[in-house]
Image: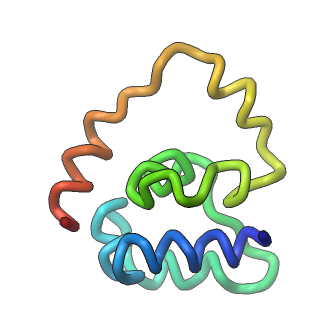
């Protein structure tokens, strides 16, 4: 699965590009730009996207160039913000 395919799958699970953007606190246009050739999802958005999409897609699929295994071994991330935003898209 390419990063664009993973993003499309996440958008499908979340419901729309607009809902994803709102949950991340960014514009729909910013999400749209990630789909352009040569553009990538900023790494800091990958963990919330993975969680918002109920782990149907992973950070590794969204940004295969990032060493996620090192980050996943670090102390637990604060997911409170993501959980609160997820409630708003439900």
Q: Position of residue 45 (x, y in %)?
A: 51, 53
Q: Position of residue 14 (x, y in %)?
A: 37, 71
Q: Position of residue 43 (x, y in %)?
A: 63, 50
Answer with left or right where residue 8 lies relative to residue 53.
right
Colour option used: rainbow
User: Which residue is at a point 52% across and 14% down the rendered structure image?
Assistant: 75
User: Which residue is at a point 42% across and 72% down the rendered structure image?
Assistant: 13
Answer with left or right where residue 60 lies relative to residue 14.
right
User: Which residue is at a point 78% across and 71% down the rendered structure image?
Assistant: 2
Reply above or below: 83 against 89: above
Q: Nearer the viewer, residue 66 or 90?
A: 90
Q: Quadrant of residue 52?
A: bottom left
Q: Nearer the viewer, residue 8 or 54?
A: 54
Q: Position of residue 71 (x, y in %)?
A: 66, 27
Q: How many labels sit on residues? A: 0
Q: Name the image quarter holding the N terminus.
A: bottom right
Reply above or below: 21 against 25: below
Q: Name the image quarter holding the C terminus.
A: bottom left
Q: Residue furthest top?
A: 75
Reply above or below: 65 against 9: above
User: Which residue is at a point 70% across and 67% down the rendered structure image?
Assistant: 40
Q: Nearer the viewer, residue 76 or 1?
A: 1
């Amino acid at each position: 699965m390419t990063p664009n395919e993973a993003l499309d799958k996440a958008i499908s699970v979340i419901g729309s590009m607009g809902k994803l953007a709102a949950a991340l606190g960014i514009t729909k246009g910013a999400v749209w730009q990630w789909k352009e050739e040569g553009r990538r999802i900023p790494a800091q958005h990958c963990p919330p996207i993975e969680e918002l999409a109920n782990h149907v897609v992973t950070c590794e699929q969204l940004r295969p160039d990032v060493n996620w295994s090192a980050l996943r071994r670090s102390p637990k991330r604060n997911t409170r913000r993501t959980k609160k935003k997820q409630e708003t898209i439900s």
